[in-house]
């Protein structure tokens, strides 16, 4: 029996240990712990990687989302359209600014926000659209941008799972007015703690973000706006700067593992593998399948030593904290179907073909055993 973790951060660390240790040691030696040299160096490198003019490092992906909204003065009385199928932080950022989230159902093939349903959600109070590059697949941005420009709306990307992805040849992060990234340790580009960044081509917004993250000051004790303590830690910036040159190779390894899954899982009855839109470069932060026997399959994989995840088992509109939005069960049928059927399989750059084959074999055996059990069940007849 193999033991396959859901992610393997130790394997990644060991592969680049000398580089990372040297970067951390440099910060310790210079003791520039708050907005130190490594922060600016990472911001410059990450902006260039994303094909944007500016990157502003913050303390988490959640902060990146919230500070984008605040930088554009979105608040009470405003509505922001976003995906019903997403992590709660996307919606929390909207409500923490005092704005109202308006949810739109998912596309049944990509599981991202369905552009065909966006325009119907627009009201006079709508200020922005916030699509999510869920699981590492870029959202369908072109039609979203067309709708936004038609109605005079802003567009922000939740790119917390999309590091390095491309949409029609363009990098995620460079597709809208501004984009938020998370560097949570398990992300494709992950820190060794929390971290995040905003990328944008708007110089004024980048300047305002720097003020907002640092207590409203650009010069110590000179506070220009009411800000927050949301700075990217210098040690985390040093780690991220060291990891960034490896990101494209790691993403390619993820795509290789995903291709192995697609090939080996093809044709399993009752299992739907991820659909990929045309002309996008998926980076597979997560590899998510669907099956109506999700819970039983997850138990089988766990017994076989395979760790899995659920992203996300309770949709936003059915979370107790968001009953205030007034949505009901049945309002977002695709999102609710996904919540009941999705299962995330292990995927990370160090996942080997043998590991993928073991996961696939376990799943094939589960389906075969389930079919045998069903065939052996006695048929009850009523007269």
Image (cartoon, rainbow, N blue to C red):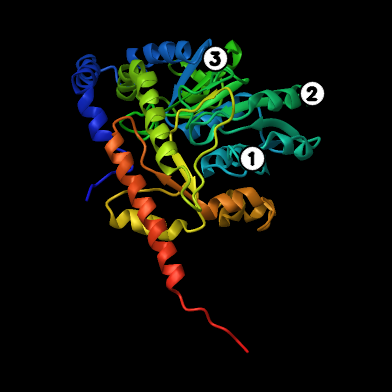
- Using the image as rendered, state which of residue 53 and residue 227 is in the foreground: 53
Secondary structure beneath dot 3 equals helix
User: Percent position (x, y) of residue 19?
Assistant: 22, 17
| Furthest-right residue in this view | 124
Q: Check if mark 1's residue and mark 2's residue have beta carbons within 8 Å.
A: no
Mark sitting on residue 150: 2
User: Percent position (x, y) of residue 25?
Assistant: 20, 19
N-term-proximal mark, 1 vs 2: 1
N-term-proximal mark, 3 vs 2: 2
Secondary structure beneath dot 2 equals helix
Q: Residue at x 59, y 17 (%)?
A: 205
User: Percent position (x, y) of residue 95?
Assistant: 61, 41
* Residue 370 sits in quarter: bottom left
Q: Disc 1 designates what residue? A: 107
Mark sitting on residue 235: none
* Residue 194 sits in quarter: top left
Where, quadrant-wise, is the C terminus in this rendering? bottom right
* Residue 284 sits in quarter: top left
């Amino acid at each position: 029996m193999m033991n396959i973790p859901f992610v393997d951060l130790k394997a990644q660390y060991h592969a680049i240990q000398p580089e990372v240790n040297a970067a951390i040691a440099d910060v310790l030696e210079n003791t520039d712990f708050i907005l130190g040299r490594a922060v600016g160096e990472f911001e410059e490198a990450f902006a260039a990687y994303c094909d944007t003019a500016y990157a502003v490092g913050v303390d988490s992906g959640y902060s990146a989302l919230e500070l984008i909204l605040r930088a554009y003065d979105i608040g009470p009385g405003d509505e922001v359209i976003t995906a019903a199928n997403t992590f709660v932080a996307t919606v929390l950022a909207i409500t923490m600014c005092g704005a109202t989230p308006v949810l739109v159902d998912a596309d049944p093939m990509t599981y991202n926000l369905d552009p065909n349903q966006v325009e119907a959600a627009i009201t006079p109070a709508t200020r922005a659209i916030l699509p999510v590059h869920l699981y590492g697949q870029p959202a369908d941005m072109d039609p979203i941008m067309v709708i936004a420009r038609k109605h005079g709306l802003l567009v922000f990307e939740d790119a917390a799972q999309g590091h390095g992805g491309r949409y029609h040849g363009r990098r995620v992060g460079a597709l809208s007015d501004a984009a938020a990234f998370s560097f949570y340790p398990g992300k494709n580009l992950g820190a060794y703690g929390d971290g995040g960044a905003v990328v944008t081509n708007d110089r004024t917004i980048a300047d305002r973000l720097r003020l907002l993250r640092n207590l409203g000051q650009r010069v110590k004790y000179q506070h220009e706006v009411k800000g927050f303590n949301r700075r990217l830690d210098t040690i985390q910036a040093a780690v991220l700067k060291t990891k960034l040159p490896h990101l494209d190779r790691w993403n390619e390894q993820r795509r290789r593992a995903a291709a192995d899954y697609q090939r080996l899982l093809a044709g399993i009855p009752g299992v739907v593998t991820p659909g990929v839109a045309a002309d996008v470069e998926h980076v597979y932060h997560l590899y998510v399948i669907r099956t109506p026997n999700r819970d039983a399959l997850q138990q089988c994989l766990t017994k076989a030593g395979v760790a899995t995840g659920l992203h996300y088992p309770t949709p936003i509109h059915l979370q107790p904290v968001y009953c205030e939005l007034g949505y009901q069960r049945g309002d977002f049928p695709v999102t609710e179907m996904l919540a009941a059927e999705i299962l995330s399989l292990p995927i990370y750059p160090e996942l080997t073909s043998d590991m993928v084959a073991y996961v696939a074999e376990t799943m094939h055996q589960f389906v075969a055993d389930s079919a045998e059990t069903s065939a052996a069940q006695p048929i009850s007849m009523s007269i």
